[in-house]
Image: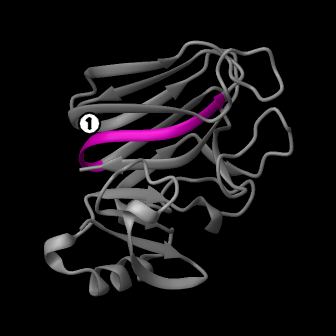
Amino acid sequence: MAKQAILQSHKPPKLRDTKFALDNFNIPDQVVAADWQSQLEEATDEVATDSVPSCISLNLEDLKCFEVVEHQYENWGVIFNNCLAIQPSNPAFPTHSGVTVLMGSPRGGFLEATFLQPTNWVGVFVTSSQRLVMSAYDSDRQLITQTVLPTANLANSDSTMPPNTLLSIAANGIHSVTFCAFDGQFILDNFRFCF
């Protein structure tokens, strides 16, 4: 039976059966990571060494609105560049879960995540005002693969795609991912990655 460690700032970590967890991308051995180092230590104390989580899901709810996001999740293995936490007030950009999402800023339409160890899968729910390209790079900054949200998917629009569309990339040796919406804005929710 696969186990999942859930970390939230309000509750101590617990193990739950993933088949009953909502919105888990069907990823076994996943940890929901807050930006607190102590929670990593508590989680690893509670989780047996043979079931250490192989996937990380970032809990964005501990971030403050308009907080610059860079090293908050470094202990979990990811550093962000050109990233801001927001709580969208524009109904065209609904959140997938919770109230806090990530947005490319101050340079609009671009966001980068760099992993401290190579990952094999990255997934996130996106809502964008333009076509959005998610690119994965290796340790030499060579493009490995890309995936594309082909069109805008704002809520209450005539888009053929719903808001909060899942974009994911699977490849060996992903060291960084970038998100680009040329002349557009986008939000990211439920950022997850697997080793």
Q: Which residue is drawn at 26% across and 22% down?
A: 144
Tell me, yes or no, whether the highlighted magenta stretch contains residue 126.
yes
Compared across the picture, whether 88 is left or right of 140 comes to: right
Quick one: label 1, few (<14), some, or many (20+) residues within 10 Å? many
**Badge 1 element:** strand
Q: Which of 63 and 1 is in front in this view?
A: 1
Q: In this view, does 92 lie above or below 80?
A: above
Q: What residue type is labelled 1?
A: Ile
Percent of width and height locating residue 177: 39, 34
**Residue appearing at x 75%, y 26% in the figure:** 154
- Left or right of 69? Residue 160 is right
- What predominant SS class does the magenta segment belong to? strand
Foreground: 7 or 186?
A: 7
The image quarter containing residue 171 is: top left
Q: Give the magenta-colored segment's residue range.
A: 116-127
Residue in the image at 50% along x and 68% along y: 34
Which corner quadrant holds the N terminus?
A: bottom left
Q: Which residue is drawn at 39% across and 53% down?
A: 78
Q: Where is residue 11 in the image (x, y as percent from the top left)?
A: 55, 84
Horizontal arrangement in the rendering, residue 153 relative to residue 39 (left or right): right
Q: Is residue 122 magenta?
A: yes
Q: Name the residue under label 1.
A: 174
